[in-house]
Image (spheres, rainbow, N blue to C red):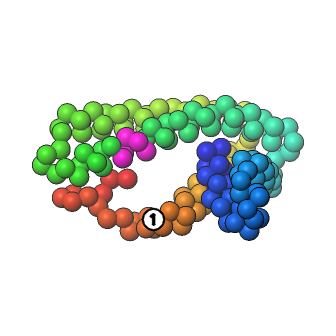
Amino acid sequence: MKLRLAIVASLLLCPVLSAMGQQDVRNPNRNRAALERQVRERTAQITRERLGLNEAQMQQLQRVNSRFAPQLNAVATEERDTRRQLRQEMMADEQANQARVSSLLDASLRLQKERIALIEAEQKELAAFLTPVQRARYIALQAQFRNRADQLARQNSGARPRGMRRPPRGGAGIR
């Protein structure tokens, strides 16, 4: 989640810096840090309101999130890299390296299992202080934050909307 927040903050940072003038553009780290803090605060406020958390629950949620977010982000990064490599290999059509494709498919499955194990462990910890309804709302809220970050990233990069990507030659697209 922290990675997604950093992405949202960085996407929001560009127009803010443009509006602030040249002096602030020379030191973007100061502005980025302030913007990231604002995004984190707003995200925490939304989470607290939508889940109906008290202060103790919010602190526990932040501790659990800080413990699992780096691991989940690392797995997500590895999954993206694996999918990118698989797409590149598949673009070779008949010249695709069969052993490499097999290895990448195995890695993809291993990473999915790792992500699921992390999510299960995170959910087990969340169950200690959140109700099932709060956990379900938290999952939905995380998905909304991810979707919004993805949407902003696509807008910023000029990428096509999801589902509008061109599949590689000779086969269906791999995400």
How far from the left and from the top, in percent, is residue 36?
A: 73, 50
Residue at point 51%, 32% (across, down): 117
Q: Residues within 10 Å of mark 1 (few under 14, many from 20)?
A: few
- Up the image or down, 30 lies above or below 70; here it is below
How far from the left and from the top, in percent, is residue 68?
A: 63, 34
Residue at point 71%, 57% (across, down): 25
- Up the image or down, 18 lies above or below 107; here it is below
Residue 82 is one of the magenta-drawn residues? yes
Q: Which residues are magenta?
A: 80-84
Main SS of the magenta part reads helix
- Up the image or down, 133 lies above or below 59; here it is below
Q: Say if residue 84 shows up in the picture.
A: yes
- Who is closer to the viewer here, 166 or 140? 166
Quadrant for residue 141, please give it: bottom right
State how many labels appear: 1
Tag 1 residue: 159
Residue at point 86%, 45% (across, down): 54
Q: Secondary structure at mark 1?
A: loop
Quadrant for residue 171, please give it: bottom left
How far from the left and from the top, in percent, is residue 30?
A: 76, 48
- Who is closer to the viewer here, 157 or 140? 157
Q: Is residue 30 left or right of residue 123?
A: right
Q: Amino acid at mark 1?
A: Ala
Residue at point 23%, 49% (across, down): 90
Q: Say if residue 48 shows up in the picture.
A: no
Q: Quadrant of the N terminus?
A: top right
Residue furthest to the left in view is 94
Residue 51 is one of the magenta-drawn residues? no
